Amino acid sequence: MSLPEALVELAEQSGAKDLVACQKAVQEASQEQRSMVNALLETGQVDEKVFAQKLGETLGLPVWPGEIPPIPAPMRDKFPARIALRHRLLPVTPEEGAPLPVLCFDPFDHLARQALAGFWEGETQWMLAPRRAVLDGLRSGYGVGAETFDEILEGRGDLPPPSDLEQETTILDGDDSEASVIKFVNQIIREALQERATDIHIEPLEDDLQVRYRIDGVLRNIPVPPQIKLFQASLISRIKIMAHLDIAERRLPQDGRINLEFEGRPIDVRVATIPSVTGESVSLRLLGQQRYDFVQLGLSPVNEQKVRSLLALPNGIVLITGPTGSGKSTTLYTFLASLNTKDRRIVTIEDPVENKLPGVVQIAVKPEINLTFATGLRSILRGDPNVVMVGEMRDGETIKIAIQAALTGHLVFSTLHTNDAIGGITRLVDMGVEPFLVGTSVRAFLAQRLVRVLCPWCCELGKYSEEYCHKVGIPLEKAATAHRAVGCDRCRQTGYQGRRAIYEICLVSPQIQELITRRESNAVIREMARSQGMTSLREDGWDKVAEGTTTVEEVVRVTAVEASATGH
């Protein structure tokens, strides 16, 4: 039996269901002279722990038992990052007088054995471990980009001057042959995209440089090499050059953008620098092209019916509310994609244009030449649009122009920063809009939050006491089918993979319109909306909990402010 056939057979024994996908991955890797084991495990078809056990039994190799210990600093010094990371070999501190345990997931990598023999003079003991455990151990032990830093320090001995960084790098193809700061920055961005991060934060501390990714709405510290602080100025300069910023200006905040390509996909990166007492902090927001459809929104049947009725309106304003990072832009783009037909002219004004929609005229705000939301909206209305999208209602002037547009036959979409749907009414009035104009022009307020989605591989049925259910407000029948997050290798021990939105939709009915005009309180308007079928953010969240999408804890986390303000 050939090696590819043997690997596919082991995959079947390890629980793989799509053997065709496994066979294809192994054959392609064999033809391209890549690791067949790595290609097989990357399909996600195989239980890596079971596979390591089966492979060990077949080859007579021991499998590392239990958790993999962290790599201590002395071992990092003896076992260089360039060998460990390039060949995916994880050293474990040996007991005194014992051979060095070296963990791997691909025992057929002969180059790895040659590399190890070339620098390690003592005895070694090869052991198998799950692929994810090896990769995570290397990542936490050496840090992202450790191999690059080792090569720079050994090869150059000095930090590259800024002039060496002025190479335009737009394609993250994973083949950075040059050991440089350019390569390290590419590695940081590439890994963030692979991890589904939305933001990267590079933050200088007194004696360190901290790198964090925001994944599924939560910040996570990223392991980096201990010598990264030495490269702080060069790293920041490289990013500023990529974003076309002034590398000499370190006293003032700057904003820019980078256009990248990752795995054939265009990626727009928004860059913001902030001066701090320990050096410049840099934030990168990663915006990739994506498809927009209603299934992705995760609307309940009732809420989807409400939204589709709004999209069928000939005119009026639909406002989406929520804090930064709550998914408002995705919802707006999904609405526009649904309306994007040949018989409609759609024009947007955004800051910035986050994604390009074919067939839609999109304008980017440029305050330096007086192209603001207000001035842009005035010009748009002279261009015969059917549908208008304004990125954000930032001031009273923009809102008043939008209201005039709605009253003259245009359908307008925009966003507001409020905690809940009803709060949008107060916000508009506070910005100088007469209540009767709010009631006659706005068709709906839609509030939303993003909750993390349970990892399907490790979630377990949760058990919640009646007292706790009463405290957070979840009905007992919905808590009965609730699941809890556990954590596994596939979700990096978080218990979650991806995010889904929860909604609160207030349709402005004639009764609510009358209450707005009479300047009734938010509490009165909310009770009327609830009597007409509006569900709160938390109630929509409980439905997601009952169907196994998210957890009670997630819903409580993202709706704490809304619940305390409304009592629901």
Image (spheres, rainbow, N blue to C red):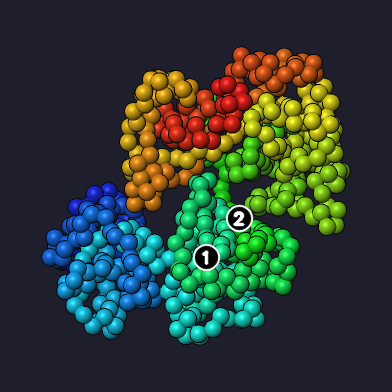
Spot occupied by residue 332 in the image (x, y as percentages of width and height): 65, 40
Q: Quadrant of the C terminus?
A: top right
Disc 1 is placed on an element classified as loop
Is residue 301 visible in the rendered structure shown here?
no
Quick one: quadrant of the N terminus? Answer: bottom left
Residue flagged by tag 2: what amino acid is it? Arg
Question: Disc 2 designates what residue?
Answer: 285
Sequence-earlier tag: 2 or 1? 1
Residue 47, image x, y percentages: 27, 52
Q: Are marks 2 and 1 in contact (CB under 8 Å)?
A: no
Q: In the figure, 124 relative to 452: above or below? A: below
What residue do we see at 46% from left, 30% from top? 544
On the image, the x and y values in percent for residue 363 come to 76, 51
Q: Is residue 139 left or right of residue 365?
A: left
The span from disc 2 to disc 1 (Cα, nearest Å) is: 22 Å
Instruction: Residue at 82%, 49% (x, y): give it.
Output: 372
Where residue 34 sits, quadrant-wise, is: bottom left
Q: Is residue 430 visible?
A: yes
Q: Position of residue 232 (x, y in %)?
A: 57, 70
Identify the disc placed on residue 208.
Answer: 1
Q: Which mark is residue 332?
A: none
At x 79%, y 26%, the residue is 438
Residue 43 occupies which quadrant of the picture? bottom left
Specify few, some or many for label 2: CA neighbours under 10 Å numbering under 14, 14-19, or 20 or more.
some
